[in-house]
Amino acid sequence: MKFLKVYMTPLQRPEIKLYIGKRRVGTPIFFPRKRIAFKSWDLGYKTKWTSDDYRFEWGPGFSFVFFDFQIAVSFIHKLPAQYWEGFLYYHFETEGSTEERLRWAIDGFPMIHHASDGKNRYIVTYWDKIVRKRYVDLATRETRRKYIEILKKT
């Protein structure tokens, strides 16, 4: 369960969502069909264009099924794609101290997007929204540096 390593990163802790009720929680590769079963599933992801271009598919979790009754635990974040893709890049593509790894992740996987509300166009950066409070300044500073670097290339 590689996703548990997220607890040793500068990223915010994922929320734990508990479901108790009729059998219904699963993933595209797992849906509990047996009468009695315990199943865990890891973070679902794929790489798209290159080996470090991560795409989030589904979040990790655990499930216990007893006949038609299920108890499931899911690990979620309010920005699931950005959170888990940032974690994957941080986990697989960086090394060094926590600060060095965060800088490296922001440099290699900047998560800077242009958005619009219909009237105004603005820039959204996600690293400062997914890191813990003590790393927000570093993430903001590094993201700005990376954005300026990108602008100079265009």
Image: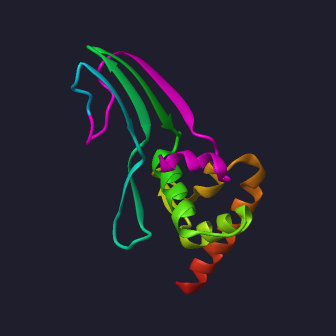
Task: Please give the name of the residue rendered at 50% of the width and 27% of the height, measured from the top-left corner.
Answer: 17
Relative height, residue 113 to residue 56 (above, below): below
Residue 153 place in picture, x, y as percent? 55, 85
Answer left or right for 21 relative to 89. Answer: left
Task: Please give the name of the residue rendered at 52% of the width and 64% of the height, measured from the top-left corner.
Answer: 92
Residue 102 place in picture, x, y as percent? 66, 64
10 within the magenta span: yes
Question: What's the colour scheme?
Answer: rainbow
Relative height, residue 8 to residue 154 (above, below): above
Answer left or right for 59 relative to 78. Answer: left
Count of number-bearing discs: 0
Residue 131 place in picture, x, y as percent? 66, 51
Task: Please give the name of the residue rendered at 58% of the width and 79% of the height, measured from the top-left corner.
Answer: 151
Relative height, residue 79 to residue 126 (above, below): above
Q: Nearer the viewer, residue 3 or 122?
A: 3
Task: Please give the name of the residue rendered at 38% of the width and 54% of the height, measured from the top-left corner.
Answer: 45
Looking at the rendering, the stretch of residues picked out in magenta corresponds to 1-30
**Residue 112 visible, this orientation:** no
Q: Nearer the viewer, residue 34 or 54?
A: 34
Relative height, residue 87 to residue 42 (above, below): below
58 within the magenta span: no
Image-quadrant location for residue 71: top left
